[in-house]
């Protein structure tokens, strides 16, 4: 991981509301038509279960997911997937801070953002009433359907976490279950702290599921090990519906692997890196930097 550009911290930037919409932007080099209603219904139903198409025209298609029932105080309703028609994509709206953390396709990033002039947007609706694992599976089932429905899609951009993923990587994905959301919907970011040997790894994207993002402030350890730890811990939080409280411990890292013989203490703190939000900070013991 290398990035020499210097960024000024901006904690005036606030995180969007926890549980807010999960936005998928499909990027294209050329304009693309909306698939016909029957094809969309068949493909989405094959990936997402029983589906009802409640609106369809050249601007919007909407599908109710009868296998994903969201629970609210007032009632229970199927979660919905809304898909727009094709419109222009303006890559200049993605700032250099976000682009610096597109680790999944750093070699292709500039090409994709310069060549792709069009987008189709998909968003979940009424999905905040789903349990975390249900919503994770719903969004990733929908992602699989979209990757099939739009074969000329060049890449997928996940605005909430800032990940840019080549479409072929999603079509060839072998990750199963809710870990698909950790793979595509959560980004482990990496920062060097200017003028010091300190580093920060944090995650962004977990709040979509009302789960905490993670933060590590450290030195003298391979940051790639820390990134791997972050993804593994994020998976644990999702698989177990976040059982970690202030003062609890998690397995630390020994020779690059999680090891139960080394325990690191967790506590909830304000994030050191934008956007401003509460995170689950992992005190890395002898590798920890800063004050806890």
Image (tube, rainbow, N blue to C red):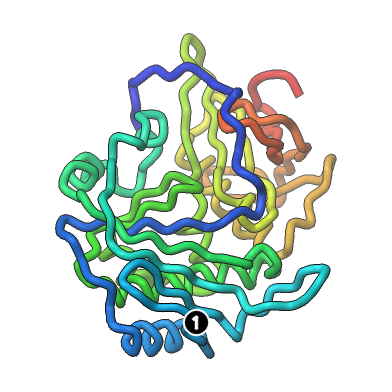
Q: Position of residue 1 (x, y in %)?
A: 37, 35
- The answer to which of 61 and 19 lies nearer the viewer is 61
- The answer to which of 252 and 46 lies nearer the viewer is 46
- The answer to which of 201 and 277 lies nearer the viewer is 277
Q: Position of residue 177 (x, y in %)?
A: 54, 73
Which residue is found at the position 61% from the left and 28% from the top?
Answer: 217
Which residue is found at the position 81% from the left and 71% from the top?
Answer: 74
Q: Position of residue 191 (x, y in %)?
A: 47, 28
**Number of dots carrying numbers:** 1
**Numbered disc 1: secondary structure:** strand
Q: Position of residue 167 (x, y in %)?
A: 28, 62
Q: Locate the C terminus and report the quarter of the image it occupies.
A: top right
- Give the residue at the far top of this rendering: 195
Q: Quadrant of residue 130?
A: bottom right
In the rendered structure, the answer to whether residue 152 lies left or right of residue 281 reads left
Looking at the image, is 119 positioned above or below residue 273? below
Residue under numbered circle 1: 54
In the rendered structure, the answer to whether residue 114 lies left or right of residue 217 reads left
Which residue is found at the position 54% from the left and 52% from the top?
Answer: 231
Which residue is found at the position 28% from the left and 48% from the top?
Answer: 89
Q: Quadrant of residue 121?
A: bottom left
Looking at the image, is 215 positioned above or below residue 39? above
In the rendered structure, the answer to whether residue 241 lies left or right of residue 156 reads right
The crowd level at tag 1 (other Cα within 10 Å; few <14, some 14-19, many 20+) is few
């Amino acid at each position: 991981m290398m990035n020499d550009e210097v960024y000024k911290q901006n904690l005036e930037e606030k995180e969007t509301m926890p549980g807010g919409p999960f936005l998928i932007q499909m990027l294209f080099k050329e304009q693309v038509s909306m698939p016909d209603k029957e094809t969309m219904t068949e493909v989405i139903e094959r990936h997402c279960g029983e589906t009802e198409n409640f609106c369809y025209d050249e601007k919007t298609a909407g599908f109710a997911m009868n296998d994903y029932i969201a629970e609210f105080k007032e009632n229970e309703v199927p979660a919905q997937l809304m898909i727009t028609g094709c419109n222009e994509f303006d890559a200049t709206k993605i700032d250099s801070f976000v682009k610096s953390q597109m680790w999944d396709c750093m070699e292709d990033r500039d090409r994709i953002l310069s060549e792709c002039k069009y987008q189709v947007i998909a968003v979940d609706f009424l999905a905040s009433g789903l349990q975390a694992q249900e919503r994770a599976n719903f969004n990733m089932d929908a992602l699989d359907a979209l990757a099939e429905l739009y074969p000329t899609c060049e890449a997928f951009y996940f605005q909430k976490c800032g990940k840019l993923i080549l479409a072929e990587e999603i079509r060839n994905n072998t990750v199963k279950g809710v870990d698909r959301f950790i793979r595509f919907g959560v980004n482990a970011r990496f920062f060097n702290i200017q003028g010091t040997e300190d580093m920060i790894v944090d995650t962004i994207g977990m709040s979509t599921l009302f789960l905490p993002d993670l933060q590590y402030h450290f030195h003298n350890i391979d940051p790639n090990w820390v990134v791997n730890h972050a993804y593994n811990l994020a998976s644990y939080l999702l698989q177990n519906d976040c059982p970690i409280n202030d003062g609890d411990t998690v397995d630390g890292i020994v020779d690059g692997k999680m090891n139960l013989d080394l325990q690191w203490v967790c506590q909830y703190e304000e994030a050191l890196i934008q956007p401003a939000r509460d995170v689950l900070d992992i005190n890395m013991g002898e590798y920890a930097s800063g004050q806890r």
